[in-house]
Amino acid sequence: MTAEAVDLTRATVAERERVQGNDHPDTLTARASLAGAYVAAGMTDAAIELYEQVLAARQWVLGADHPEVLACRSQLAGAYLAAGSADRAVSLFERNLAEWQGTYGPAHPNSVAEATSLGGAYLAAGKAGEAVTVFQQVRAVRERSLGRDHPDTLTASGQLAYACRLAGRFKDAIPLYRETYSGRERTHGPDHPETLMALANLASAYQAARQTREAITMYERVLAARERVQGPDHPDTLRARAILAGAYHSAGRLANAVPAYERAVADFERVLGPDHPDTLTSRGNLAHAYHMARRHTEAIVVFEKTLADSERVLGPDHPLTRTIRENLDVAR
């Protein structure tokens, strides 16, 4: 479907250029759409080149601070981010944010959206401290204009919590995650997917802070709710079970981790298939748990099968394949 979208959009661009000319606004819009299709198809170099052409043309016609120019620059920044050039994306988002805030003020929806994008780019660039500052500003604007329990405010709180976590500021992250979870529960109810995701994020923060007892209790609640609401075979339920197994593993509770991994592997294989990345990941984790439980023969058998499948499905240089290979070497 992605390749088809690229071909269809290319045809539209060609028709616009033939009928309306290269610099007509409709032609530039079509070119920007084609660049977006390139990003979706993973053709980031082509997307960047095309976005830069569209940006230059729009700046020439409309001026550097026109909203369409700012929107195009933001799209270009997103393409750089998709290409792994986070620092280049940061500089473009920073310039755009200054333009939006200078013209429309920090509370304008476009200013808030650009600040959110900049925060994400900071995280991708490994600048968690700068991301915290930006997300603090976003959260303050959201809370002031929309209220504490508005979904956008809760999303901003979750983003700030995540940035704090990456910055190692667990004393700030955990209360923010707890606040986000409480807000989701008040707004959506205890069994809503957004509420369960917020609870899982809170559990993950506790686990990262090495408060494993609290984390496991919350992961168990998430799994029970997903089984009840979504059913035992829903992919979200399967992943919740695998995450709980991982928490048991991290806590050294191998008597709980091994059977949890065994069920997760069986369910992933049955529901998603033996070659799905989640299946391969869970099998690798099960093998590692076997090894830690001194069940070395079983560990090696599972590692060897998983490595062969991972090399075949994902390739020999995929991160998961490398991890399994390294763990197998240790197990031997």
Image (cartoon, rainbow, N blue to C red):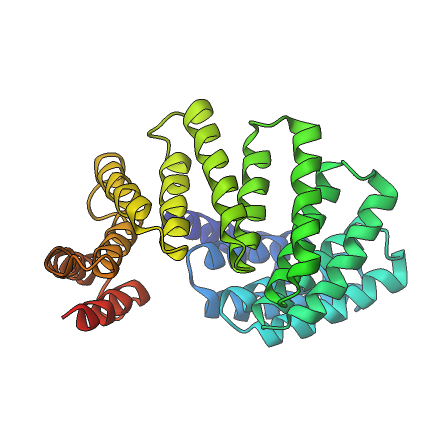
Quadrant in which residue 86 is drawn: bottom right
Relative vertical location of residue 290 with respect to residue 232 in this rendering, above or below: below
Quadrant in which residue 55 is drawn: bottom right
Q: Which residue is at 62% across, 56% downward? A: 162
Q: Which residue is at 37% across, 31% downward? A: 234
Q: Position of residue 176 (x, y in %)?
A: 70, 50
Would residue 56 be seen by someone viewing this image from the given angle? no
Q: Which residue is at 13% across, 70% downward? A: 332
Between residues 123 and 17, which one lies in front from this camera angle?
123
Q: Position of residue 130 (x, y in %)?
A: 71, 70
Q: Give the number of marks.
A: 0
Q: Position of residue 139 (x, y in %)?
A: 78, 51
Going by the image, does 274 lie left or right of 38? left
Relative vertical location of residue 118 with respect to residue 113 in this rendering, above or below: below
Q: Position of residue 178 (x, y in %)?
A: 67, 44
Going by the image, does 111 lie left or right of 211? right
Relative vertical location of residue 213 with respect to residue 224 in this rendering, above or below: below
Between residues 213 and 230, which one lies in front from this camera angle?
213
Which quadrant, please, contains the N terminus? Answer: top left
